[in-house]
Image (tube, grey):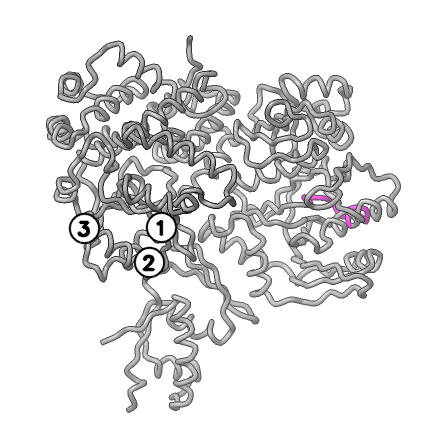
């Protein structure tokens, strides 16, 4: 079964200059695909960087410019939010590490170009959790978990506090103490991550992960987590990070050893494999070979073929023209797999069933508390 | 040479296009591709969009819209889909055409930010634009429809598209929505108005649309410089009264009615400030349309 | 010299403020957080005196407003405005 083409979107990302050759029909498709994949502002940012905007048809340009307006606004709000979080946590003296989009934006990384982001994710030592939670509550953040069940799920099994929402601004912060859930099969050391973290310029207690760890975290987030709706955007993030950090000579040398140390070989393997396949990311062949032979990498070629089928379908952007009929199933399988990698199997079915039940009858009494 | 308009194709052909490759329509300043199997959608388009130009599938469509039946072919409800996304919960199938209209407004205000968009009606006379910001229930749509019958050109009945660089309003004329008694009131004022399908018992009451005057469509490329910002309030049987309103409070009220002033940052703030600077701002209350029309007929230009 | 003369103020460094004044008030937009607010004409005047970023004491501000040396009652009135502006996160007290 051949999959519909996402060549248009790929080319736009990998070779922005090709955008000046597109027909109106191609622009029509690209704008829709890019918007659904959360990449329209990224394309707009590339057009700006490479001075291509004047060569884009005005009909399409309107949409690009509009996406850029929203992304710019989001970046400003993010910077404001980080400032307020910094002020809230200052009394504790605890340094916190920004993760994902917030880290890319505050660090001025290429991966932040035109990136839309909502929640702020931070990493702190597990022992600091009570103090951090308390400091945030003092400044107006409130735990977002809907029920006792969710509270327990997050605190017992996941790697984070339940998300906290600011009562006035409505913004959300996710406080993590590890980058994968406690209940997961691999255990990347938070101490290792925190001790390698780098303080951001101009800040005292705001940090980001070291480049190697940023890549590994992005990989583990994409290939462990359950949510795959923005899967293609995750691949684009990884591609940006690998290209930017890959320019430094030590980076490729240290990448696989660090993955071994953090028990993240498998997600790194998938990250390198699929960024190469989908976006032509320049991963050196020796590094690819190295990760394929490292402990934890998938060995069975049948298994790999099956994962290829699942991932390459699921990683495609959600748009009528880019997904074939199989994709919803593939996503669901990966969602289950994502959860499987996090939770011991017995708990998994119970959680998924409960989550869908709650979505349909939000005002029914919580059965967990009823049964005691 | 102008392109053929929707009125040049038969209702049968229109229905066929809606049910297959889609109807490509130029609704200045946009192009839409529309699909729908629902008869009331075809009715509405046929009755109200006759003067709009057909576009070609070779063009760039700003939005690809489908108003489809509910899931599992549930024909009592309909859903609005744009570019593969379903932003709203289903409505009764009889509201299909109204859903299309609301959905189009949503698409533009959600995805286009090259203009500062303000929730308001906006009309033009002698090159100057009148902005009527108004929350629901203020009588804005009746006022707007009536003004159209009294020589004002329709720029939009739902949103002002303000260019932040030039300060001009870009027209986006479409069928004018009317609710409940307005439908009859406007029909009585001018028997020649064309009203499209009525959606009964929607969340907003009974909703129908009045065909936009042809002149408004012909001149859709003519932008206008704002001159008046008038906040209307319908008060039954009250005498019509136009009272000047402070500019700072007018600014705040307008900002509250703006979809994207904050998102635009400094640029949005300055565009709104310039708009308020150059306009005369008023509160307007009225109980009888005739009196209202007389007041608007004599609106002085700002000095 | 009273203790009031020692309280100093400046425009909040957290914000990026844009102002516009009319007869009935001043609108202030903070581009850093997207927040918009409207100040009365008097409060607007006070804020505008600090908008350049300079640090000024309550006494200096009162005197600037009155175009003459301010009496303690005047300073107290201006301080009401200053406290209100501070609680709106437009200005901040400078200590020490």
Q: Mark 3 points at which residue?
A: A127
- Magenta-highlighted residues: B147-157
Q: What element carries label 2?
A: helix
Q: Name the residue under label 2.
A: A137
- The image quadrant that residue A196 belongs to is top left
The answer to whether residue A93 of the structure is visible from this angle is yes
The answer as to whether the residues below labels 3 and 1 share one chain is: yes
B195 w.r.t. A242: above or below: below
Q: Which residue position is annotated with label 1?
A: A164
Q: Can residue B51 be seen in this view?
A: no
Q: How crowded is mark 2: few (under 14 residues within 10 Å), some or many (20 or more)?
A: some
Q: Which residue is drawn at 25% across and 57% down?
A: A89
Does A194 sit left or right of C78 as displayed? left
Q: In this view, does B194 lie above or below B42?
A: below
Q: Give the mark nearest the N terminus, 3 or 1.
A: 3
Q: What element carries label 1?
A: strand
Q: Nearer the viewer, residue B231 or B28?
A: B231
Task: Examine the structure image and report whether residue A366 is included in the region drawn in magenta.
Answer: no
Q: Mark 3 lies on which chain?
A: A
C-alpha distance separating marks 3 and 1: 18 Å
Quarter assignment of residue B65: top right
Q: In this view, does A344 lie to the left or right of B6?
A: left
Cβ atoms at labels 1 and 2 below 8 Å apart:
yes
Q: In which quarter of the image is the N terminus of chain A?
A: top left
């Amino acid at each position: 079964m051949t999959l519909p083409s996402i060549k248009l979107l790929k080319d736009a990302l990998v070779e922005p200059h090709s955008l000046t050759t597109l027909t109106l029909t191609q622009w029509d498709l690209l704008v829709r695909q890019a918007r659904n994949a959360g990449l329209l502002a990224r394309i707009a940012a590339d057009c700006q960087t490479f001075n291509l905007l004047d060569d884009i048809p005005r009909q399409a340009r309107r949409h690009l410019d509009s996406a850029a307006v929203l992304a710019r606004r989001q970046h400003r709000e993010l910077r404001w939010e980080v400032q307020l979080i910094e002020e809230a946590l200052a009394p504790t003296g605890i340094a916190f590490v920004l993760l994902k989009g917030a880290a890319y934006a505050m660090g001025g990384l290429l991966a932040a170009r035109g990136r839309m982001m909502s929640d702020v994710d931070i990493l702190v030592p597990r022992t600091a959790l009570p103090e951090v939670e308390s400091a945030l509550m003092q400044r107006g953040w409130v735990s977002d978990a809907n029920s006792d069940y969710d509270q327990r799920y997050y605190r017992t099994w996941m790697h984070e506090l339940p998300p906290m929402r600011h009562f006035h601004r409505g913004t959300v912060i996710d406080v993590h103490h590890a980058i994968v859930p406690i209940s997961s099969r691999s255990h990347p050391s938070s101490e290792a991550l925190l001790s390698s973290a780098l303080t951001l310029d101009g800040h005292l207690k705001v940090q980001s992960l070291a480049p190697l760890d940023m890549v590994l975290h992005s990989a583990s987030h994409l290939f462990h987590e359950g949510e795959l709706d923005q899967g293609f955007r995750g691949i684009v993030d990884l591609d940006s990070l690998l290209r930017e950090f890959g320019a430094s000579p030590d980076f490729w040398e240290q990448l696989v050893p660090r993955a071994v140390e953090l028990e993240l070989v498998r997600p790194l393997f998938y990250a390198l494999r699929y960024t190469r396949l989908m976006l032509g990311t320049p991963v050196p062949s020796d590094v690819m070979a190295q990760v394929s032979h490292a402990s934890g990498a998938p060995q069975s070629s049948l298994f790999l073929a099956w994962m290829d089928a699942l991932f390459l379908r699921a990683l495609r952007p959600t748009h009528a023209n880019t997904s074939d009929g199989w994709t919803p199933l593939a996503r669901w399988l990966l969602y289950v797999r994502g959860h499987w990698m996090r939770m011991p199997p017995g708990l998994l079915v119970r959680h998924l069933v409960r989550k869908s039940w709650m979505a349909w009858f939000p005002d029914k009494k919580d059965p967990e508390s009823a049964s005691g | 040479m102008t392109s053929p308009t929707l009125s040049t194709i038969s209702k049968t052909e229109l229905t066929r296009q809606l049910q297959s490759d889609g109807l490509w329509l130029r609704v200045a300043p946009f192009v839409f591709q529309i699909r729908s199997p629902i008869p009331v959608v075809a009715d509405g388009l046929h009755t109200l969009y006759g003067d709009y130009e057909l576009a070609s599938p070779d063009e760039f469509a700003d939005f690809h819209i489908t108003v489809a039946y509910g899931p599992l072919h549930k024909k009592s409800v309909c859903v609005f889909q744009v570019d593969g996304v379903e932003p709203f919960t289903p409505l009764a199938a009889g509201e299909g055409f109204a859903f299309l209209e609301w959905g189009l407004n949503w698409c533009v205000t959600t995805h286009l930010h090259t203009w500062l968009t303000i929730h308001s009606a906006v009309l033009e006379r002698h090159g100057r634009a009148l902005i009527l910001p108004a929350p629901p229930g203020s009588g804005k749509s009746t006022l707007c429809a009536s003004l159209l019958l009294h020589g004002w050109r329709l720029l939009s009945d739902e949103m002002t598209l303000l260019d932040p660089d030039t300060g001009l309003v870009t027209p986006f004329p479409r069928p004018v929505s009317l609710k409940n008694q307005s439908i009859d009131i406007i029909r009585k004022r001018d028997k020649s108005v064309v009203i499209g399908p009525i959606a009964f018992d929607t969340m907003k009451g009974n909703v129908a649309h009045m065909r936009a005057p042809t002149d408004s469509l012909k001149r859709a490329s003519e932008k206008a410089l704002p001159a008046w910002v008038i906040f209307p309030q319908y008060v039954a049987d009250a005498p019509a009264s136009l009272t000047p309103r402070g500019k700072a409070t007018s600014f705040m009220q307008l900002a509250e009615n703006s979809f994207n002033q904050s998102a635009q940052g400094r640029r949005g703030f300055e565009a709104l400030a310039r708009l308020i600077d150059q306009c005369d701002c008023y509160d307007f209350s009225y109980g009888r349309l005739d009196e209202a029309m007389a007041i608007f007929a004599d609106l002085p230009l700002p000095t | 010299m009273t203790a009031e003369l020692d309280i100093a103020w400046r425009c909040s460094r957290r914000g990026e403020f844009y102002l516009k004044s009319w007869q009935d008030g001043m609108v202030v937009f903070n581009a850093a957080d997207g927040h918009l607010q409207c100040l009365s004409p008097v409060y607007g005047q006070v804020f505008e005196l600090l908008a350049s970023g300079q640090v000024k004491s309550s006494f200096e501000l009162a005197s600037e407003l009155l175009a003459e040396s301010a009496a303690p009652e005047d300073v107290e009135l201006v301080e009401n405005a200053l406290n209100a502006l501070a609680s709106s996160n437009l200005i901040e007290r400078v200590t020490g």
